[in-house]
Amino acid sequence: MVLFLLLVALFLFPTGEAGKIIGGREAKPHSRPYMAYLRIQTPENILICGGFLVREDFVLTAGDSGGPLVCDGVAQGIVSYGEDIPPDVYTRISRFQQWIKETMKTYKLQGPDCGPPGLVCPSSLG
């Protein structure tokens, strides 16, 4: 699953600026909420935080580890970890682009033994 997410992230490499939150209203039931996005830059590194903004005081992030942070239809990050209060912290995909490319070349997704133990490759799905 992780390898599949990395493949998706590679092909959806960011091409534009991040989305913006507009309006600041509570989302209606069954509507598509806005994606919250925050960039935190420290001398050590850059973190991207975000989640689905449902209300001003509530960001839907619980249980989303490994899920994407998507802005304008483009994957920007993968859920890394969270604290007791939102927003959660996302791993920035672009910082790992070289590693993703090297990993994809190594496994090539060819046959049932294409990756780490337990990985189900697309060609082995029936």
Image (cartoon, rainbow, N blue to C red):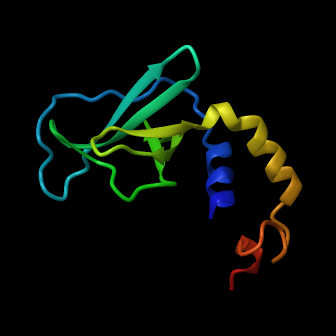
Taking the spot 61% from the left edge, 55% from the top edge, the residue there is 5
Taking the spot 86% from the left edge, 51% from the top edge, the residue there is 105
Q: Quadrant of residue 82?
A: top left
Horizontal side of 72 relative to 77 (left or right) equals: left
Horizontal side of 113 relative to 91 (left or right) equals: right
Question: Which residue is most to the bottom?
Answer: 126
Q: Residue 86: image x %, image y %?
A: 29, 40
Q: Quadrant of residue 4?
A: bottom right
Taking the spot 58% from the left edge, 28% from the top edge, the residue there is 15
Q: Residue 92: image x %, image y %?
A: 57, 34
Q: Is residue 83 above or below residue 16?
A: below
Quadrant of image for the C terminus: bottom right
Question: Which residue is most to the top?
Answer: 43
Q: Is residue 102 above or below residue 118?
A: above
Count of numbered marks: 0
Horizontal side of 99 relative to 27 (left or right) equals: right
Instruction: Choose between 45 and 37: the one closer to the eye.
Output: 45
Quadrant of image for the N terminus: bottom right
Instruction: Choose between 14 and 49: the one closer to the eye.
Output: 49
Q: Residue 69: image x %, image y %?
A: 45, 43
Taking the spot 69% from the left edge, 58% from the top edge, the residue there is 3
Q: Residue 45: image x %, image y %?
A: 57, 22
